[in-house]
Amino acid sequence: MPKMSLSHFEATLLFSILASVVLGVVTKRTDRERLRYGLYCLACFAGSIFGAGWVMYFMHL
């Protein structure tokens, strides 16, 4: 089996995408609501990733 090597950012982004899909599918009733909520969750996850990254960067200075 081939080995998959992901950076920390890629692994976190992959988790964000998968979690957003699951949250969108299980929490909303219509396809439009699912898509909008999934994109909203993805934006929140991505924003949190970048926000936490900048906080760690400034703590390191």
Image: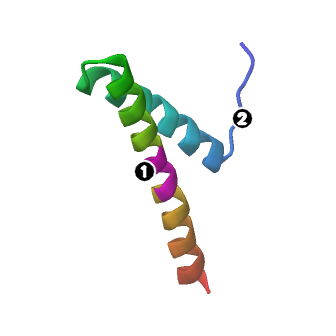
Q: Nearer the viewer, residue 29 or 11?
A: 29
> Residue 21 falls in which quadrant of the image?
top left
Horizontal side, residue 13 vs residue 28: left or right: right
The disc placed on residue 19 is none
| Residue that sits furthest to the front in the current view | 32
Q: CA distance from mark 2 to mark 1?
A: 25 Å
- Residue 20 within the segment the image draws in magenta: no
**Which quarter of the rendered picture does the C terminus lie within?**
bottom right
**Residue at the image point whose x is 24% and y is 27% from the top:** 27
Q: Position of residue 34 (x, y in %)?
A: 35, 25
Give the residues drawn in magenta, as a range: 43-47
**Which quarter of the rendered picture does the N terminus lie within?**
top right
Element assignment for label 2: loop
> Residue 22 falls in which quadrant of the image?
top left
Which SS does the magenta portion mostly show?
helix
The disc placed on residue 5 is 2
Q: Nearer the viewer, mark 2 or mark 1?
A: 1
**Residue at the image point whose x is 72% and y is 35% from the top:** 5
Q: Amino acid at mark 1?
A: Cys
The disc placed on residue 44 is 1
Element assignment for label 1: helix
**Residue at the image point whose x is 50% and y is 66% from the top:** 51
Colouring scheme, one of rainbow, by chain, secondary structure, one colour: rainbow
